[in-house]
Image (cartoon, rainbow, N blue to C red):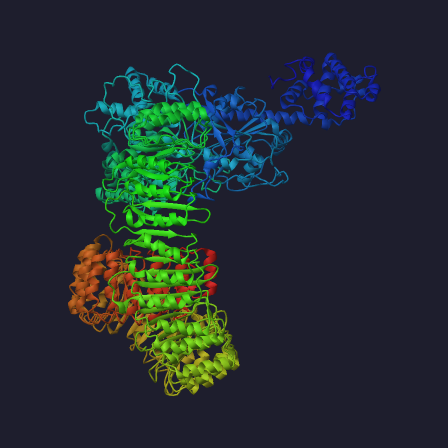
Amino acid sequence: MDEGVGPNSENVNSVLAQESLELLNILSGQSSAVIMKLFQMMPSDAGCNINQASCNRSSAAVTEHIKGLLEYFRVANAADCRTFLQSMCVLCDNIPMHLESRLMSAAGYENSELSNPSVMAGKSSLPPSKQLIKRPRIDYWMQYIAEVIHSLQRRWERVSELLVSEVQLENVWVSVRTANRARVRPDQTPGPGDKRARTPEPDWDYGSMDSRVTLENFLQGCAGKVTVLVGPAGSGKTLLMSCLGQQWAHGLGPVPSSCLFVLLEFRQLNILSRPLSLSELLLRHYVPVKHSDHEKEAIVDYLLSNPEQSCWVLDGYDEFHNKITKQDLQIELLDPEKPLPVADLISGLLNRLLLPGCTLIVTCRVRDVLDLEGMSDKVGLLLGWDCQEIKEYVDNYFFKKGHSANRALGVKAAELLVSSGHLLAMSSLPALCNMTCICLEYLLLESRNPGGTSIPKERSETRLKVGESEKKEPQIRKLEDTEEGGYVQREDQGRSYEGMMMDGTIKRPPPPHTQAQIPSTLTQVYLSVLGAFLSRDLDTRGNNDKLNTMKLTDILSQHRSELGELSKLAWNGVEESKILFMNEDITQNVIEFSIRKGLFSQVELRCEDGMLVNSYCFTHLTLQEFLAALRIMTSDDVSDMHLKKRFSLRTRWMTRSDRRTVFTDSLHLFLCGLASPYCTPALVHLARTSGGTGGPIWVEKRQSLVLNLLTKLCQSNNLTGPKILELCHCVQESQDHQLAKQVVGVRPTLELRNIRLLPNDIDALAFVVNSVDNNGVGLDFRACSMDSECLDVLPRCQYIHYLSFCSRKYGDKFAEKLSSILPKFKSLRKLEFCGASLTSTGAASLASALPNCPEVTEINLSDNNLKDGGIKPIAELFTKLPRLVLVNGMKELTVTISQKSDLDSHKTKCEPTISLLNQKWSRSDMQQLANSLARCPALSIVNISGGHLDVDTLRMLIEFLPKFKITKKIIVNDSGLTMEGLVSLTALLSDCPTVVELRIRLQSPAQVSIAFSGGRKNTNGVSKVLCLRCCGLLPTHLERVWRSLGTCPDLTFLDVSSNCLGNNGLRKLLDILPRLSVIQEINASNNGSGKERVVMLAGALCSQNSLTEIHISDGETEQVILKFCHGERDENHQKKLFRMNNSSLLPSDMTTLCKRLVLCHCYLELDLSYCLLTDKAIENLLKVLPKMTSLQRLNVSHSITSTTGALALVRCLNVSQRVTSVELRPHAESFITFDSVKAKETSCRLTHCSLQGDNLERLLDILQQGPKLSDLDLSSNQLEDEGVKKFVDRLQKLKITSYVNLSNNGLTQKGLLDVANALCICNNVSGVDISLKAEDRCVIWSTQYEDCVKTLSVTDSGLEHDHLVRLAEIMSVTPSPIKLEFQNNLLQSDWIEDFLKLLNSGQRGFSMSIDERWIRSEEAVSLLCRCLHLSSNIHTIRVHHTTLHLSLMESTELTSVSLVDCAVEGHHLASMKSIIQRCPLLTQLDFSYNNLGIDGAEFLCSVLPSLPNLTSLSIGSKEASVAVVEKLSEALVQATAIQCLNLSGHAVSDMAAKIMTRMLPRLRSLNLSHCEWSASGGLQLIQTLGECVSLEGLCLDCLQLNEESRMALAQALRKINSIRSLKLNKIATAMGPSQTNGVLDLLAAMEGLNRMQDIELNGWMMGDRGIEELTRHFPVWMELRRISLSKNLISDLLGEMLLEALKSCTHLEELHLPSNSLGDVTAARMALVLASLTNISVLDISENRIGHEGSVSLSKAIMCMKNLTKIDLTSVGTSKLCPVAASLAHCPLLQDVRLGWNNCGDKVALELVRVMPLCRKLKRIDLESNAISVSGAEALVKALQSCPAVQIIRLWRNNVSTTKAQTLSLKERRLNFSST
């Protein structure tokens, strides 16, 4: 339609005539008011019937009047007709844009009022502005469309320039999505590990025969809808959208030319960061226009008024950085003029909140469809090319070369392509087909070159789908409904391939003359593709100028520099999800190189300001991923940890919560492929200079790492089906057959469930499956979608013994196809085709094939649509199968052939199962059956249930039974068995050696089972079981059973529960115990035995040697269980258990029981948990207790219900001297443990009682009379202040050696003062630890030593002024030295001052620390000054962070002042000047890590002259400052008394350095760590060190030393023989290329340092040579006390040498060797060496590689380290640290244990639980990042109850949920689950 016709080029009356019919329809839908206005435009004589028309409202009449109106103006003069059309366009609604445009164009601008006065008379009063408003708007609209047309045509010219073949939408095929929401899909549930996380498939399928259409037809009818076109990366979506735009620009295609075509690429939208309006998106970003604001407003106004006149194509949603979601709530339309983020604009379009009614076409990948679910009206899958289309493209590609040689190459290339599964799969995608052609051309030309390299041939023949060679209509092409682009091999060709045989193999032509070799893996294909790209040079138009046929390795070497930069760019892009690169991302020469070689495509980007810029992307996403993989494998800038993070198997199950990525997830596949030895030469050539290090060694290391990661995955047994398949692809890429064996070794059956399978998947499976040889493997395709092409390839999987197809997707056609390949599986034994849609037709197909499968022994066709007709052909199979056992003459016969592994030969046997149910058995019938069964070679199960068996018939069966060859069991349920029959059957256990188990139940439901020994020839010593439950047995029956059973020496388990034996029966049972020589357990529960059984069983426990456990319970069900242990044990060391639960013991019963147990001479545990124990019963127990000398443990858990009962049991401390611990808590776990002899010390825990008033007095009386206690826990007993005071008053009389725990007793500040008073009144109290708030902690520590320092620690207790006054009074009269610790008590400054005034230090001295948050900065200085002013007894004063430290001593002078790291600034120090100057005896000043600045330096300069005795000055800084040192340097020279100087962290100018050289020689200690200086200044200082002959301490950490400075330092060290402490951490790493020689020189320079005590050389990376040099000095370092050598590359063997050399350092106290490569050898040497180094207190070997053997060796070393206080084994490489944890029990001084990051489990935690009470000084345990579960954490909580000294246990990153962690933290605040 001619939309642009002007008023002068077409007759206006003709236009009206042509459009009259459509105008009639439009005017008929308008309101009556509009119609009346149009009628009024007619002259009065013509409009005479207007009033009549208005009165007659019928639709027919109105239509007739409208026809008359149109007819009038059709013949009117042109001016009147124009005026009518203009008015109609203004007044009417819903005129299509194309029609409105034509009418307005024909009507023109000019107003025709003046041309016909008659018309004026009849015209409406329509304003002229209204009449003329639409015309300009449409013109601007049409002008903008013209500009868009020009833009799209220009775009197409640019895009199509390099196309090999023409794009035709009518030849592009789309598979339309069909919804399946109503269908039940029970087989799509993910596995346990995927529940709530994955959805196997979306509820739709692609590709039914009726849904395949061309793209042109697919887009028909999309007007006003949201249409989604999906396809993999490289399928041509962007190209097709550009073609669609080009067709629209020419008035062609499915999008109407009247619409505005808006083509937006998401990759372009990503750069729009600021909000913008719809107008800005369209007119600034899409096609910018230079119109005025009025014109732009007109264009947008027209768009908003006619949204249906626009078509928006949104291309590449998979590349969008944001995620679009459906708006479920009803919300208002968005304001198109309001600036919004671009994601909100796109979301508004898709959710119909912007431009409702517009047409939307979105392209994306399949995995992204879920985001658009609910917004899309139509979804189609873009299908790949079939074989014929691929061949046509190959022909076009080589034809374009323009000469005959390349045409000949094209023929050969096509032949090679169809012979390679990898290349053919790639070629189904247009973008990759182009790459394939380039690759083939390179390979063919290379094969002509005699020196060309060879690439391994395809190892297996490719089989593809059967197709009709002449059929032009393509078959259905399917694609997996998941992340389809990830693995280009998996893009389903899905269309028929020409030239294929009926068996699926390719009908190949004769071999071509050239012998080009095809890569065998996808990775090798891409390596060849890379070589092909590098071998060519393109001109500016993309033509191939020349092709280099050099060897691949030579090509890679030639371009290794450019490849290094490209691979780095690719890797960075993968890391940042970036595919577009700007000029600033890469050098210009590499850009030109990449474009010339075809590796880059150039893309125009429009920036936010509207400017066009060039950007670049790799030719395909997979090429970028391949280059990224090359980077990983050849460069050390990608760490091993990063590689591990990137190496993971993807799943094909999709969810909306999945991480979106623009890439295809092929990286891990390429890594696996590059780990193959076939790729090693190429990697080595790249690794030499492309950022890699070490060449072959580096590549080998990386390849080994990838293979190790792959090995772990192969050995994992919890992978889902999709990940197993992905693993197979990875293994195939690696070409490692050993890995393939491991895959099937872990999982003999590969369960590939709920995924869509493609031929390439089957090919990968074949590689893995074929590695098993004759061992056999199973394939389970449950609920998988697969096409028949997959079945064509499936026979390549050899050695299959089990196939399973379970899904409704599998019907008769699938079964027919399957039957054609089944005979090819020569090893197939079991076939499942269940839960499918099989009918008689499909069953017949399968039945016809199965006779050709000679090994098949089991077929499962359950849950199909089979009726009798379908079952018949299957049933007939049984007559054709060998080894089938038939039993004739029976009504019901079921024979199932199963398989069983022969225990001796490991061969497979066929053992039928026979079921003969509900038969009427006579004696003769049974004889006939028994004869038949006796002749059977081997049977698995015989089931004759449901038939009545009288005694004679049963005896007939029993007579023949020894002759049966039954491996499992005989079942005789519901057969009317009597007691006489029961007795007869029991004889089988003695008479028939093969019978091992007899289970009989006579009560309903009656059950009889006779189990056999499984075909074993030798049954001697086989355990036998007799179970006679619910048989109504009486004591008399029991006697008959014993007689029938006879001598059955192998009976190990006897169950006579739920009978009627009573006490007599139980007695008879005990009488026969001597006959049961190997019995292990007897169950006599629920037999109505009375109270007498308790004494009876207790006597048996004492008299029967082998009887070890008695379990009695009177709960809901009566329980009586006896357990035995046979063997030649020492009777005195055998342990026995008498457990009686849920019972009520009378006092007399308690006495009788205990007296009977007195006779037990073995170690005895008496368990009376959950029993009702009265006070009298407890009293009787205590009376007998002294006589129970074998009792080791008494368990009364949940049996103590009152405080009175608990106190009664506490009396055991006075009754028995063997008690080692008492732990009592009402209604909870309660134990009393005993020693064999008199206990040395005892522990007592009595918690959660009500110890008030008389109860407390009674307890104190008991304790006062009792033995010495190591510890006493009275926490949570409601003592409150009054009770605590009573306890403290009597504490001196109690014999407690370790501690008393009074926590959680409701203590207030008043009680706190009473507890603190214990320090004064109790000589043996050494410390009090109190916290009143959330923790509610109160612990009193005891000591056996007099005159020790006593400690009072008060935390979070809200002390007031009066409390401090009282504490000062208490502390002042305490005779011993006092140490006070106050933390977070809300103390005010003046309170602290008053407290200081009141303290009377005396000669014993005080030390005090006060930690409050406000003690910082100026407040810290002020407090320090006031303290010095108030007290003349302060010896030292220090503020560190927020803590004030004071030491006081009567008649002493101030010697030390420190303000360290407390935010003090230089100007704050002015107030200290007068005080400091009055302290001439001051020897130490420390102002480190503050912000001194120039003011602080001036302060020091002013006070230093007044301090003649100052020997130590420390002003270390966090930030380098030149001014401070420069200002101080002269003053330091003048302060001649200073011997120790710390200037760490400062910047030293050359001038300051020169001045300082004058003072350095007199120093004894110097710290210049982290200092900054110039080369010359630093050299001056280091050279001066040689003159420091008295220097004892030197710290130069992290200094930047050049070669000259290093040499100077070495010379200086040779001259300083006085050094005792040397710290040179991390200086070696700063020495540059000469590091190795420099390290050795420095180490050699230490030879004369014979007085060395402390040395730190961390971070030197000295390696083996350095360690050898260092160890030469150890024999003369006799005084060495501390050595630290972290990060020094110490190998395991050199670690052994190091330890051996340390033997001479007998004073060594600290050994730090973290972050090295120490292993089991070093640990073994530690076990020998550390035993002699008895002074070691700190051992740090964290971050090494200790194994399990090393752990055992280390434990032996730890046992000898009695002075150990800290051990750090963080990340030592083994989780098996139980031996180490156990050995800590030998370290009584241990305070800090660190076992984090070792993946330790609960076993280690439980071992620590056992050790913790033995390490009384233990304060900290670090177990973060392990595998400790809730069970282990709860055990630690329980252990903490008896470890008050422990301050924290870190458990961050363990297997404890957040909720449970919070619960445990509330229960025990010392457990820390946070990261800090």
Measured along the vertical axis of the image, is residue 1746 above or below residue 180? Answer: below
The answer to which quarter of the image holds residue 1134 is: bottom left
Where's the N terminus, which quadrant? top right
Q: Classify 73 as above or below 638.
A: above
Q: Nearer the viewer, residue 1432 or 1538?
A: 1432
Q: Position of residue 1091 (x, y in %)?
A: 44, 67
Q: How many marks?
A: 0
Above or below, 1113 against 1290 in this view is above
Which is nearer the eye, 694 or 79?
Answer: 694
Quadrant location of the C terminus? bottom left
Q: Is residue 862 visible?
A: yes
Residue 889 % position (x, y): 38, 30
Q: Is residue 671 left or right of residue 1498?
A: left
Q: Residue at x 22, y 74 (%)?
A: 1590
Residue 835: x and y, percent? Answer: 44, 32
Would residue 1876 be visible to someone looking at this image? no
The quadrant in which residue 791 appears is: top left
Task: From the viewer's perspective, tell me whether residue 1776 is left or right of residue 584.
Answer: left
Q: Is residue 1308 above or below residue 205?
A: below
Residue 48 position, x and y percent, is 84, 16
Q: Is residue 1779 left or right of residue 488?
A: left
- Residue closer to the observer: 463 or 605: 463
Q: Nearer the viewer, residue 349 or 1217?
A: 1217
Quarter holding residue 973: top left
